[in-house]
Amino acid sequence: MTAVQSWLPANVAGEPDGTRVGVPGTLTGVTVQETKQGRRWVEAVVATGDGSIRVQVYAEVFDACAGLLVDGSAVTVTGVLDRRGPALVVMTRDVAR
């Protein structure tokens, strides 16, 4: 397993899918969604001084860190890169202060 690297959004664009990253920044545009099974998950943006990157926080992670998933929270999002069409997304595995 590859070690998690700390990245700023401007530096991840050329990295391949599956690269493990930690992105420190401020959550913005937090939108809570619900699955067909009624479980909540979040789509948001982590903004830093040098750019921003979209993140998705699925139910298992949401349940563990829901209190951190609000607009304006300073967090580090850890996960793996995944290209969704033209967009680059961090599929979140952990959120911490």
Image (cartoon, rainbow, N blue to C red):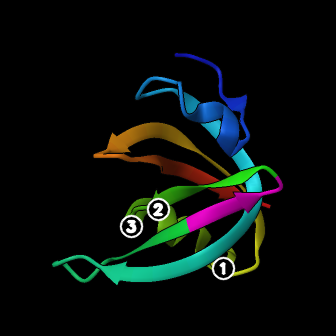
User: Which residue is at 18% across, 78% downward?
Assistant: 37
User: Which residue is at 68% across, 70% downward?
Assistant: 27
Foreground: 82 or 51?
A: 51
Q: Which mark is residue 59?
A: 3
The percent coordinates of residue 89 (x first, y second) are 45, 49
Q: Nearer the viewer, mark 3 or mark 2?
A: 2
User: Which region shows up in magenta?
Assistant: 45-49
Neighbour tally class for label 3: few under 14, some 14-19, many 20 plus, Cα within 10 Å: some
- Say what amino acid the circle numbered 2 marks: Val
User: Which residue is at 45% across, 72% downward?
Assistant: 42
Q: Taking 71 as reference, is 94 above or below it? A: above
Question: The C terminus appears in which quarter of the rendering?
Answer: bottom right
Q: Which of the 4 quarters of the picture holds residue 69? A: bottom right
> CB under 8 Å between callouts 2 and 1?
no
- Say what amino acid the circle numbered 3 marks: Ala
Q: Nearer the viewer, mark 2 or mark 1?
A: 2
Q: Taking 32 as reference, is 14 above or below it? A: above
Tell whether 83 sits left or right of 88.
left
Per the image, the residue denoted by label 2 is: 57
Per the image, the residue denoted by label 1 is: 67
Neighbour tally class for label 2: few under 14, some 14-19, many 20 plus, Cα within 10 Å: many
